[in-house]
Structure formats: C-alpha cells, structure tokens
Amino acid sequence: MTTPLELARAFVSAVEGRDADAAAALCADEVEVMLPGAETPLRGREGVRQMIRMSPSFLQSPRSEAAQGLEAQVTTLIRFPGAWANYTTWRFETDGELIRRLTFALRAAN
C-alpha cells in the first residue's frame, strides 16, 4: 500500500518534471483538480494532464509536508525567475491507493 504522503511526493515530482502521464497515473479515473481562482475543477486523468501542459516551467523546492489519515499536504516554494515566486500548498485527498481530489492554496513569497 502506498501512503498518501508518498502519493503526494510522487505527484509533485511528476509535475516538476512535467511528466503529465506519470502524474495522471497516480490519480483515480474520476479525480478532481481545483485550481486557484477556477470556478469548476479539472476532471479525470486528462484534466491532470491538461493542468501540467498549461502550467509554465518553474523552479520548485520543498518546504514542508504532513499527512493525516487519507490526506496529505505538501508545501513548496515555486519560482518563475524574474517574474514571481509563491508558496504553494498542495492538498491531496486519497483513497489510500490513488489521488481522488487535489486543491491548492497560494501565498506570495516576494
């Protein structure tokens, strides 16, 4: 059995590597991804792929992580050199095997 924190780490790593298929493989078929400011979630594994394809290339470094039950949280510092930086808190809801829902909280770093 994979832990929620292992799933979260693997997902964040896949996003950083821009590996849309690897990230999608960690998710349930009906996964929901709620992007900051969006009114409706991206849905399904194709929604995960879409999220990665539309995001800019950035530098990312881990800051903290936590898990409780079937949920995990990873906070990273994301930098787009010369433009912006923010702390992104990724919140993962899992079923113990796959990611079912992903939400984000952003906080300016500069």
Image (tube, rainbow, N blue to C red):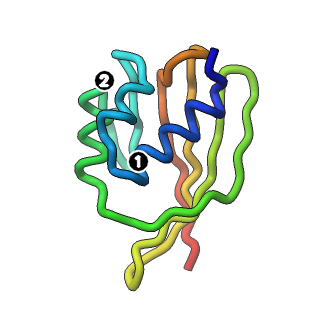
Q: Position of residue 66 (x, y in %)?
A: 74, 40
In front: 13, or 86? 13
Residue at x-position 58% and y-position 41%: 9
**Label 2, residues with CA under 10 Å away: few <14, some 14-19, many ≥20:** some
Residue at x-position 47% and y-position 71%: 79
In front: 62, or 17? 17
Tag count in the figure? 2
- Please identify the quarter of the rendering in which residue 49 is found: top left
Q: Amino acid at mark 2?
A: Gly
Instruction: Look at the picture and state if 100 lies above or below 62.
Output: above
- Please identify the quarter of the rendering in which residue 88 is found: bottom right
Q: Where's the C terminus, which quadrant?
A: bottom right
Q: Amino acid at mark 1?
A: Val
- Residue underneath mark 2: 44
Mark 2 and mark 1 lie on one chain; the one further toward the N terminus is 1
Q: Position of residue 2 (x, y in %)?
A: 62, 21
The nearer-to-camera label among 2 and 1 is 1
Residue at x-position 50% and y-position 45%: 12
Residue at x-position 65% and y-position 33%: 5
- Circles 2 and 1 in contact, beta carbons < 8 Å: no
Residue 49 shown left or right of residue 17 in the figure: left
- Residue underneath mark 1: 15
**Label 1, residues with CA under 10 Å away: few <14, some 14-19, many ≥20:** many
- Label for residue 56? none
- Per the image, label 1 sits on a secondary structure element best described as helix
Instruction: Look at the picture and state if 74 lies above or below 43.
Output: below
Q: Position of residue 44 (x, y in %)?
A: 30, 23
Q: Where's the N terminus, which quadrant?
A: top right
- Per the image, label 2 sits on a secondary structure element best described as helix
